Amino acid sequence: MDCKEVKERATILLPVNVSGGLLALGDLHGAMAGGEICVSGLEVAGKVTVTVDIIKNKTLPLPMIFSDTHIMTLASHEDLDKAVDMAVINMVSYLYAEHGFQKDEATMLISLACDVRICQVVDPKKTARVELCKKYIKN
């Protein structure tokens, strides 16, 4: 995903599309600008410690990232505009399903309080994210 918000203390929710999960990690960046414009970030060697939990019987618009301060939805598509649209729709779905917002209320909150960011444009599928500050969510 090449998203600079995938970092220490972040919780990343990923879909499981195959039996067994097949989780792989790599491509660590010591630094990377938003958008990863030109082929790579500052690639570094490193060790990553992860805890993996499986969330069953829950439908979430994945992938998502939860930081100490923000909830983020991500989407990738060959067309950056479509990636943005998908990330917005994912945030609406999350707010509706998990926080009881009506879809029109969620859409208005996104318009007023969310930031749209570009994670990367270097790969054939471009990645966008929508960020919502947790202070706008009660629980």
Image: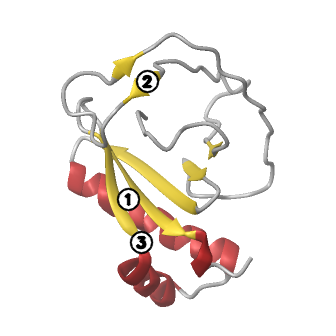
Please, what is the three-letter code of the amino acid marked with disc 2? Answer: His
- Could you give the CA–CA distance between mark 2 and mark 1, rounded to whole angstroms? 26 Å
Above-or-below relation of 25 to 78: above
Please, what is the three-letter code of the amino acid marked with disc 1? Answer: Met
- Could you give the CA–CA distance between mark 3 and mark 2, rounded to whole angstroms? 26 Å
Secondary structure under tag 2 reads strand
Mark whose residue sits in front, 2 or 1: 2
Give left or right: position of 89 versus 39. Answer: right
Counting residues from the start of the chain, the first of labels 1 and 3 encountered is 1
Please, what is the three-letter code of the amino acid marked with disc 3? Answer: Cys
Callout 1: 10 Å neighbours few (<14), some, many (20+)?
A: many
Callout 3: 10 Å neighbours few (<14), some, many (20+)?
A: many
What residue would you read off at disc 3? 114
- Could you give the CA–CA distance between mark 1 and mark 3, rounded to whole angstroms? 14 Å
- For the residues labelled 2 and 1, say whether their Cβ atoms are less than 8 Å apart: no
Farthest residue to the top: give it. Answer: 45
Above-or-below relation of 133 to 100: above
Mark whose residue sits in front, 1 or 3: 3
What residue would you read off at disc 1? 86
Farthest residue to the front: give it. Answer: 30
Counting residues from the start of the chain, the first of labels 3 and 2 encountered is 2
Callout 2: 10 Å neighbours few (<14), some, many (20+)?
A: some
Give left or right: position of 49 versus 43. Answer: right
Secondary structure under tag 3 reads loop
Residue 47, image x and y in percent? 64, 15
What residue would you read off at disc 2? 29
Secondary structure under tag 1 reads helix
Decide which of 10, 126 is in the foreground and name it. Answer: 10
Could you say which quadrant of the image residue 40 lies in?
top left
Residue 98, image x and y in percent? 68, 72
Give left or right: position of 58 versus 107. Answer: right
- The residue under the point 56% across, 88% down is 102
